[in-house]
Amino acid sequence: MAERAGQARAPLIELEGITRIYGQGAAEVRALDGIDLTIREGEFVAIMGPSGSGKSTALNVIGCLDRPSGGHYRFCGTEVATLTRDQRALLRRHYLGFVFQGYNLLPRMSALQNVELPLIYKGLKRAERNRAAMAALRHMGLGDRAHHDPSELSGGQQQRVAIARALAGRPRVMLADEPTGNLDTKRSIEIMEVLTALNREEGLTIVMVTHEDDMAAFADRLIWMVDGRIASDGPMGKAA
Amino acid sequence: MLWETIRLALQAILRHATRSFLTVLGVVIGVGAVIAMVTVGQGSADQVTADVEKLGANTLMVLPGEDPLGGGPPGTALKMFTLRDNNALEEQLSVVRVSAPISQMRARVVFGNENRRTDVVGTDNRYFEAAQWEFALGRPFTAAELQSGRPVCVIGETVRDTLFGRADPIGQSLRAKTLSCEVVGLLRSKGASTFGTDQDDFVIMPLRTFQRRIAGNSDVSVLFAAIREGVDTERAAREIEALMRQRRRIGAAEEDDFDVIDMKQVASMLAGITDILTGLLAAVAMVSLLVGGIGIMNIMLVSVTERTREIGIRLAVGAEARQVLMQFLVEAVVLSLVGGLIGVIAGLGMGYLGARALSVPFAPDPLIVLVAFAFSAGVGVIFGYFPARRAARLDPIEALRHE
């Protein structure tokens, strides 16, 4: 943790004039219309905004799942646009963890195998992989569900498996797209408490998209988007 | 990494054994059908070849009539041969090793309470030599029996079985038409011929006995000539034809009123037909293999949405496109090969049973097994790999959003 503390407040994610345009000509849709944004190590950022405001698109660009149409995106000082497909895959593999609204677990694999997935690509040996995945699942309170298929787990449990998968690769940033979107309030709060603890205790940088004020309230910083632009950006409480 | 990938693929297949099996069922059936068909077909062809070999030294049959298969106009009396014609073949043509005169008709033979309709044949000892018959019991005819047309006969195994059962027939008297004749010999069984007829179903008596007591004429209906070793049968046939034209006084402009048949040629033609049939069966089986492949493609396409999302997830957690592709390739190939393997085993099993049912040799062809196996792997690559490749080229978010 000493190492992380040393790097604290260093810019991790820098967006400069980022655009993402779908379609051409008259059918052109500017999902992102010039985003400037800096996220530093250890922040817990919530992105909110009405439907179609571009908040998920922004998260996908940050996560290198989608490519911007224009502007500059630097991750740890590296210009992402200069990276090849495979280099972007390596970046995701070693620095990023994803949590999705629909969990996105592989249906015909046990919880344990799902969590092991990123570790296979990291090249860990079987035993090592198994140990790390079990540890991540226990951390999420799912040690006894390791061998269940996703279909045998509740929504809250599935999302915790997804979080375990995101954490197993020891990422620098966790990107969460509506992580509580499919859950009831009680489960949602449980998930948010898990994320908050990861941020506070382990210094994990979290960027979360949500449309629920209650969930956004767990974050430290709130970014409000409208029509592909950032309408406001500030510490939680002031901006909202 | 490859080994790990194969292990994971096998794990994924076994985890959903029923689903996996249904996916490859088409390939299993297709591969099995091809192998079974070709195996049985090859066995039949081998059987025919063996039968051709069994015909032994090249033999030619000389039959009266313009076209022995089609026959002449109805009511036209065929000009038969004589014993002299037969002896002329032997004496005047060096290519003929031995020639037997044959005359025959269908007749009922009776012994005690048993009877059978069979071929009653008049010939002499040269027939046993030309057609390579061996004696199981008894002896051929004596010169005296042949000379004076004594009522004696040599019988085939089928006739013996019907009339005498397992008992010793030698010295017994059977009745052919109105003639009572003594059995002096029993021929060793040759079984069914290439043409499916029973070669052991006949009673043989001296030609003179047959002509006088059964047929009531002095005709010879077939000349059965064995060709000397190393002589081309076509050349022999030409020489026989020339001699017979001369003996039967056929003018240069006239057509033959007899026909020379090469038994081996007929058998070879039959082998050719068997080959064509095998090819047809194999073609039908290939179609079923193709249908099996289309079945796999169908299931793969149905699951492509699910698999595209899976690819998106794998890309999101940091897989490189080629790692994902390698996994899908291995999974598809392993699945089809497992299907192919089951198909090969089932096909060989069916081929074995089929060969036994038709009593032909079991002749598995390694080449066709290899081809069927390679085909099933190809099906896996084409229908499993190419959809995956398309998905792996998408940006991860597009793959994740795939509906």
Image: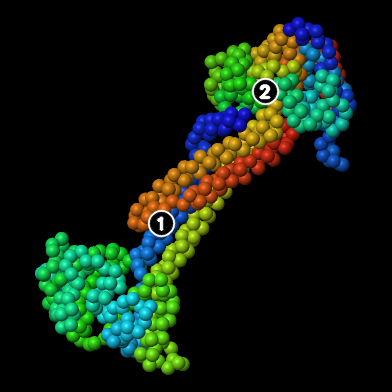
- Front residue of this view, candidates A174 and A169: A169
Q: How many marks?
A: 2
Task: Give neighbour class at mark 1: few <14, some 14-19, many 20+ (Cα, 10 Å).
Answer: many
Compared to residue A92, the image places residue B199 above or below, namely below
Give the quarter of the figure containing the C terminus of chain B: top right
The subunit letter for the residue under badge 2 reads: A
- Looking at the rendered structure, the kind of residue marked 2 is Lys
**Residue named by callout 2:** A122
Q: Where residue B394 appears, x then y in whole percent?
A: 73, 36
The reply, left or right, for residue B158 in relation to residue B265 is: left
At 26% from the left and 72% from the top, the residue drawn is B128
Residue at (79, 13) in percent of width and height = A41
Local secondary structure at mark 1: helix
The label shown at residue B43 is: 1
User: Dot 2 lies on which element?
Assistant: helix
Gap in Å between the C-alphas at discs 1 and 2? Answer: 55 Å
